[in-house]
Amino acid sequence: MIPTEETKGAALKYDRVFNFSAGPGGLPLEVLEEAKEDLLSYKGSGMSVLEMSHRGKAYDGIHMQALADLRSLMDIPDDWGVLFLQGGASMENVLVPMNLKMEGSTPSYVDTGYWGHQSIKHAKKLTDLTVAWSDEANGFTRAPDDDEPEFTGAENYVYYTSNETVDGIDYLRDAEFDSDALIVCDASSNILSRPFDLDKYDVIFAGAQKNQGPAGVATVILSPQALDIAAKQDLPLMFSWDAAHKGHSIHNTPPCFTIYVCGLYYKWLQRQGGIEMIQVVNERKAKLIYDAMDGSEGFYKSKVPKSSRSLMNILFNLPSDELTEKFLEDAKVEKMVTLKGHRSTGGVRASMYNAFPETGAVVLSDFMNAFAERYG
Ligand SMILES: Cc1ncc(COP(=O)(O)O)c(C=O)c1O
């Protein structure tokens, strides 16, 4: 989104930085201002969303509208479930095997990076499983082609991570694996950044804190088949997708303020023209950074091939640790923060979710060009 005079003014007023955080990520300034406006008295109710009953009319309106807006943004049919659950994406790593359990079947996992690997570790505590494809031996560089993972044919579900936040690897497509099993996707770091064709999925889940709102909730999207299987499990209330679905995710006290801010975010995304429009902006932002990398004559290096380059989390390395430190320090002077790579990868990681302003990508690409010119 090209900033308007108004948002530029507000960014200056609050001395906002370019926040490249991988999560929680930056929120649109408009969303923060709306939340600020409502903070002490929500729409004349005399109380904050932070204080109101989750069973009251005002919160019910906020909650149901947020669910409806997520449905409309992602074109989710009425017979699918949409849940807001606590425990983040990591909780879903646990709830997936519990809710999709089927006698005589075990799942297969695709191991593409840090988060895919974590999901396998969690699931192994609850079920036998097969790893259908792993790039661990190569240090995680890419997403597989559709026909590379090898399935047993006896799966209850196939699990993959559509964008590896730590490794900067994205499928850049809806995977179409050769499997009749339910397809489960952790889309924490690229949900709402591009269209997802729901015909290719049964479960999509995502922690909200990157591309939907603040931390505190994971959205879970369930096909009718996934809902049916979940309904057959006998699980305690807080583990049960079925209970959450039937209770509209108010089966216990939900994280009301987080869901309210997610609702503001969904409205903001609708005002941007929805997912198709934000995808165009995301592609433009990422291209600026990848062009700076590719034009640097090897000064900036990435292990990820073009076919798997994430638009949300862009990783690169400089020729030495000293230059990396210098890069990060000099970037801070230009108000670019949180560019340091994850502890497991090192280097630089520029995370640019939907809300990250396009001007920030221009500033980073200019900075990269000048830095490479000077130290290359
Ligand atoms: C792809 C992916 N999956 C799972 C997680 C874990 O999310 P949470 O911290 O909400 O449990 C993250 C967090 O960064 C992530 O990026």
Image: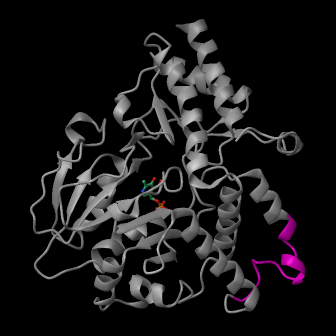
Task: Tell me which corner region of the image, top left, top right, bottom left or bottom right, holds residue 375.
Answer: top right
- 185 or 40, nearer to the observer: 185
Q: Residue at x 28, y 73 (%)?
A: 97
Q: Specify the principal SS of the magenta part.
A: loop
Instruction: Name above or below for residue 101 compared with residue 155.
Output: below
Q: Position of residue 340 (x, y in %)?
A: 54, 35
Instruction: Name above or below for residue 325 compared with residue 283.
Output: above
Q: Residue at x 29, y 88 (%)?
A: 233
Would you say 317 lies left or right of 35 here?
Answer: left
Instruction: Name above or below for residue 357 compared with residue 227.
Output: above
Q: Position of residue 115 (x, y in %)?
A: 37, 53
Q: Does residue 351 appear in this view?
A: no
Any magenta on residue 47?
A: yes
Q: Residue at x 22, y 66 (%)?
A: 124
Q: Quadrant of ligand 1?
A: bottom left
Q: Position of residue 59 (x, y in %)?
A: 71, 84
Would you say 373 lies left or right of 299 here?
Answer: right
Task: Tell me the magenta residue range.
Answer: 37-53
Q: Does residue 20 appear in this view?
A: yes
- 92 or 294, nearer to the observer: 294
Any magenta on residue 60?
A: no
Would you say 224 lies left or right of 284 here?
Answer: left
